[in-house]
Amino acid sequence: MKKILNTIAGEIQEVLAHVDAEQTVQLAEQIQKADRIFIAGTGRSGLAGKMFAMRLMHSGYQVYVVGETITPSLESGDLLLLISGSGGTASLLNYAKKAKEIEAMVTLVTTNPQSAIGEYSSQIVRIPAATKKRLESEPETIQPLGSQFDQSAHLILDSIIVYLLQTYPGNRSEASLNQKHTNLE
C-alpha cells in the first residue's frame, strides 16, 4: 500500500508541476470579480466542483451548483465554471452555449483547451493529467479512469481558495469560515 500511495502522490505532484500558475491566478481573479459563481461538472469532476463551491461559500462568495433545486438563473455578470477532463461533456457544452448567449463568463478546467467547451470559454485552466480516454498525450498513471485529473482539479481549486483568502482577506478569518460551516451535522 505504501508504494501505491507514494506512486499516486508522485503522479499528482508531477501533474501539478506542469500547471500554468498564471491560469489559476486568472481564474481566481475572475471569481473575485464575478457577481455570482455557478459550478458544474459530471461524475467525480462534479464532486470536485461541489467541494470547491462549499469552500467558496465558506469564504463568503455567492456560489451555486448547477442542477441543484435552489440554483437560480444564470445572468450577465455571473461566472460559469465548468470542470471536464475531456472538455467535451455534452451537458456541460450545452451550459457553456447557454451562458454565452446571456453574456455570462465561462471558464473551463480541463486537460484539453482545444475542446468544444474550450471554444466557449474566456478562461481555461489546463491540467495535463490522465483522463478515462487514455490518450497518447496524457501521462501514465496506475489509477483508474479519470482519477488523476479529478484529484489534480481538487487540489488546484483548493489552491485557488487559499490564493483568494490570502489576496483578499477582508474579514475572512478561520473563525469566520468556520462560522459558515454547517451546524446541522
Image (cartoon, grey):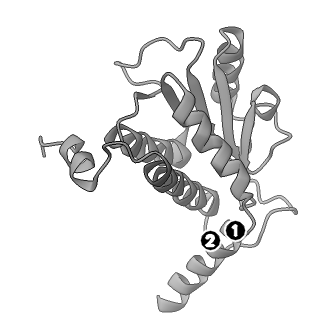
Residue 160 drawn at (x, y percent)? 53, 51
Q: Which residue is mark 2?
A: 12
Other residues around mark 2 within 10 Å, as few (<14) / some (14–19) / many (≥20): some
Give residue 104's quadrant in the image.
Answer: top right
Horizontally, is 103 left or right of 54 in the view? right
Q: Residue 16: where, in percent of width, then height?
A: 66, 67
- Residue 142 visible at all: no
As helix, strand or loop, the secondary structure at mark 1 comes to helix
Where 113 falls versus 2 (above or below)?
above
Query: 30 or 109: nearer the eye?
Result: 30
Q: Disc 1 residue type?
A: Val
Q: Please tell me in which quadrant of the rendered image residue 117 appears.
A: top right
The residue under label 1 is 15
The relative height of residue 28 versus residue 160 in the rendered view (above or below) is above
Q: Position of residue 158 (x, y in %)?
A: 48, 55
Residue name at image x 55 percent, y 46 percent: 45
Query: Does any portion of residue 170 appear in the rendered image?
Result: yes
Residue 47 disc label: none
